[in-house]
Amino acid sequence: MTLTRCGIVSLFIILAVSPTPFSQSIIQISPEKKGAHLRRNEISGQRRGVDLYCESWKFTVETNDAGIWSQVPERCVDFVKDYITGQRYLSESEAVTDSALAYAKTVEVSGNGKDAWVFDVDETLLSNVPYYNDHGFGSEIFDEHSFNEWVNLAESPGLPASVRLYKKLQELGFTIFVLTGRSEFQRNVTGNNLLYAGYSNWETLLLRGDSDQGKLASVFKSEKRKELEGEGYIIHGNSGDQWSDLIGFAVGRRSFKLPNPLYVVP
Ligand SMILES: [Mg+2]
């Protein structure tokens, strides 16, 4: 049978518009082999499905789209454990420090001591991963009593990326303020822990006083930063793992958000 030119064109059109097994994808990747690999692919596909879901959940946490949440979703606990105890957390934190340092080097430090950088404490300067390792990696409701017992040990390690940033900022001439939602009664253990973790020579350690209890972290921290600005400091950079460290007012010229899929503080 001879196909006419019209017939060839019709066949091409039919093939072009016919649905294919891969028509759900916008970007076409080579089809996977079938047969013996099918069962293995199903299992790994389920794993990829969970990872994809949890990656997406983590994205909403880091962008603050998730808002306030109380526990890591049950299906993502292993994902969070693997993330926070693995290389990716360290790598992403280092990437944040790289960005912060690239910016810091562009700042013309005046030399009058008024060029400031603000750091949060928990999951910013210090890591509480050893605590969360014993408390379900964010799957448990926050227990202030047991966490304060952990704080009293003053054994939280420094987050390596933040140790690097902190020391480099000091070399560049920035004045360092440590601003934490911890309370005044934890001043000594917090200071001791910071020293233990490799930090020193901060200008002031700012904690919640009696009049600050009950305030949202975003309000308390904004008020403290405003006071610093009132004292003539220019807050060039602000580093924290929570959006409440970075939003509000007197936010500083640049903010640097560290990853934290373990918990949220409003
Ligand atoms: Mg924090």
Image: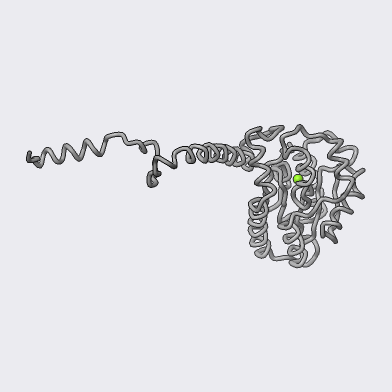
**Number of marks in the rendered image:** 0
Q: Indicate left or right for 213 with 26 as reference.
A: right
Residue in front for this viewpoint, 117 or 28: 28
Counting from the top left corner in percent of width and height, residue 127 is at: 77, 49
Image quarter (top left, top right, bottom left or bottom right) of the N terminus: top left
Which residue is rendered at x = 67% and y = 51% of the image? 86
Which residue is rendered at x = 70% and y = 48% of the image? 85
In the image, farthest residue toward the front: 36
104 lies above or below 135: below
Determine which quarter of the picture holds residue 147.
Answer: top right
Display colour scheme: one colour
210 lies above or below 110: above
Q: Indicate left or right for 160 with 43 as reference.
A: right
Counting from the top left corner in percent of width and height, residue 29 is at: 39, 46
Residue in front for this viewpoint, 157 or 223: 157
Determine which quarter of the picture holds residue 183.
Answer: top right
Which residue is rendered at x = 50% and y = 39% of the image? 45
Residue in front for this viewpoint, 81 or 126: 81
